[in-house]
Amino acid sequence: MKELLVRLIEKNRPTANKGQIADYIPALKKADPRDLGICILDMSGNICTGGDYNKKFTMQSISKVVALILALMDNGESIFNKVDMKATDEPFNSLYKLDLPHGVKPANPMINAGAIVTTSLIKGNGEEKFNRLLELLKKITSNKSLKYNVEVFQSEKTTADKNRAIAYLLKNKGLIEEDVEEILDVYFKQCSIEVDCVDLAKIGIFLANKGRILETNEKIVDEKTINYALAIMTTCGMYDYSGEYLSHVGIPSKSGVSGGILAVVPNRFGIGVYGPALDGHGNSVAGMELLKDLSNHLNLSLFS
Ligand SMILES: NC(=O)CC[C@H](N)C(=O)O
């Protein structure tokens, strides 16, 4: 496995040339576009890593999976009164449909509008919401030192006109009830939580293991909630590229604009990938190619 990972990383590293680092959040520009790393965890706790697997990056949209899980744990299925679970052909930061006359709720919790809603539905005030999300993540990853990157948080907070517009529209439509700036702060902080590929693989194996911590066998999230998370990752996790990605790679996944991809092979593997050069949809170019090769080699697709 190790040899396979090394070979696939070196094969796919040059594909980063086809992509670009996200620069709409200025602090993300510092990433090295040639970085490519992977970590795979299996259900027996075996770990295999390759390339730049220990480079740190911020979770960005990958945090939306954790916010969804927490919102479901706190409120159950009633969250779907405020956010749908439909695939979308619009970019992750689209807002215009929110202002259509007939009260359209955000398409799904994996795009920005939907994630701002799920974040608002986490119980507690702003500080409590964020702390609960971070604590859940620390437990899932068994990484007590997880924290958010203050520079990335500030950088997004001061440049987030589009997300701010989305959030005020949501408030205007009654889809979020609390103070908009407070919710946005939680959202930017969750996006700024710093992880590496190992942390992502741990989240992956937790989902693959239906909400149980692998080491302790402790069940912390019920199966129904995990099923929702995996289903919505499958249909919406790569934004408006989810259909193509599912055809090529075939497993529930979630990307973020800093270049991370969380991928799950139910009952088998948790996978974390990092490659910061992105395609036009905001997905890691080399990361997706690497996962495609890996899926072909190991028969990972749900349809294989
Ligand atoms: N696609 C993403 O990763 C988006 C997350 C980013 N923080 C944003 O809201 O724009």
Image: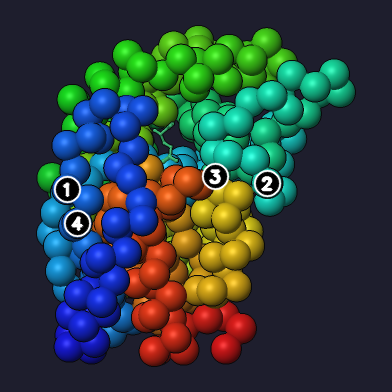
Give the residue type at disc 1.
Asp
Query: Residue 117 at x, y = what percent?
Result: 58, 29
Query: Residue 185 at x, y = what percent?
Result: 37, 20
Give the residue type at disc 4.
Arg
Q: Image check: 3 left or right of 96? A: left
Q: Earlier in the sequence, mark 4 or mark 2?
A: 4
Q: Secondary structure at mark 2?
A: loop
Q: Image check: 76 left or right of 160? A: right
Q: Earlier in the sequence, mark 1 or mark 2?
A: 1
On the rendered image, what quadrant is the C terminus found in? bottom right
Residue position marked by numbered label 1 in the rendering: 32
On the rendered image, what quadrant is the N terminus found in? bottom left
Q: Earlier in the sequence, mark 2 or mark 3?
A: 2
Disc ID at residue 34: 4
In the displayed structure, 273 sits above or below 128; it is below
Residue position marked by numbered label 2 in the rendering: 89
Q: CA distance from mark 4 to mark 3?
A: 26 Å
Q: Residue furthest right?
A: 102
Q: CA distance from mark 2 to mark 3?
A: 13 Å
Question: Which mark is nearer the camera, 4 or 2?
Answer: 4
| Mark 3 residue crowding within 10 angstroms, few (<14) / some (14–19) / many (20+) | many
Q: In percent of the image, x 47 and y 62: which residue is there?
A: 253
